[in-house]
Amino acid sequence: MSIDTLPPLREVIAEHGLAAKKSLGQNFILDLNLTAKIARAAGPLDGVTVLEIGPGPGGLTRALLASGAKRVVAVERDERCLAALADIAAHYPGRLEVIAGDALETDFGSLNLEGPVRIVANLPYNIGTLLLTRWLTPNHWPPFWDKMVLMFQREVADRIVATPDQRDDYGRLAVLCGWRAKAKILFDVPRSAFTPPPKVTSAIVELIPRPEPLPCDQDDLSRVTQAAFGQRRKMLRQSLKPLGIDPALLCAHAGLDPTARAETVPVDGFVALANAWRQARSEMGQKA
């Protein structure tokens, strides 16, 4: 498949010496059919600014631009990739901005991203979950993005979308994602699609922000889920003890059975627990 007149990705990688680095979590997708499929998963891109993390040699970048994205802002840590991305920028004048730097140190709020904004990325495996958590926990909500289409290892994707019906995968990440977004797995990506092939299957996950999540302080929710899932096989009346408030009292205020285990409590149950914990601390004169 040819999406533009730029050279095939294998030639780009050879020309610029872009062998994937394990230390950077790099696994390049060279199949332009697949990158085009990922770009289509982001929906119509006319008038949309896309934020991409870790573009590498630019396979997905090219697909996003060819699909009509008004602008792509790509954050790339690997300086070896900058020349290849500059060639793409020249081919799509005024539509690609490359930021040389570490995504974990990037202030996305300062990038002047004009909406609507979508985050579409084959995230480096070693920072994917951390970036997702940051994008789900900004100080202000709704966030700057209206959709995320992200690639993760399949086991991480399962943890993102899990419910109490998938108890082995359901945990703190699922509660956070379920509280603030609607998440679903769109499709799998086989190991053979990458160079070099990773050890596991990957998956594309779509996340759409909930305009009005259930009211809750995110730090309280984090502490409550940390306690509950820290001893996930124990009943709440035992696992919630580190919170310093009688677990039976918290469960009563949250409408939960104190003999239940964390893996059976839905997202709204954890929100209720977090709010009950805050209220109890307030009544006891503890710091809220």
Image (cartoon, helix red, strand yellow):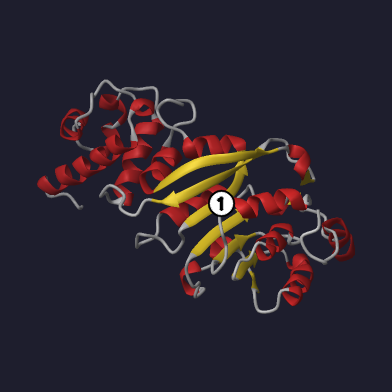
- In this rendering, the answer to whether 262 lies above or below 13 is above
- In this rendering, the answer to whether 83 lies above or below 54 is below
Nearer to me, 257 or 35: 35
Question: Which class describes the residues within 10 Å of circle 1: few (<14), some (14-19), or many (20+)?
Answer: many
Residue at the (27%, 32%) spot, across then down: 241
The image shows a total of numbered marks equal to 1
List x then y, in percent, for residue 234: 35, 22
Indicate left or right for 252 with 147 as reference: left
Residue identifier under label 1? 149
List x then y, in percent, for residue 125: 63, 47
Residue at the (85%, 64%) spot, across then down: 7
User: Can residue 25 be seen from the camera position used here?
Assistant: no
List x then y, in percent, for residue 280: 15, 42
Name the residue at the top extreme.
259
**Quarter where residue 224 is shown:** top left
- The three-letter amino acid code for the residue at tag 1 is Val
Query: Secondary structure beneath disc 1?
Result: strand
List x then y, in percent, for residue 270: 30, 37
Residue at the (75%, 77%) spot, across then down: 90
Residue at the (54%, 69%) spot, across then down: 47
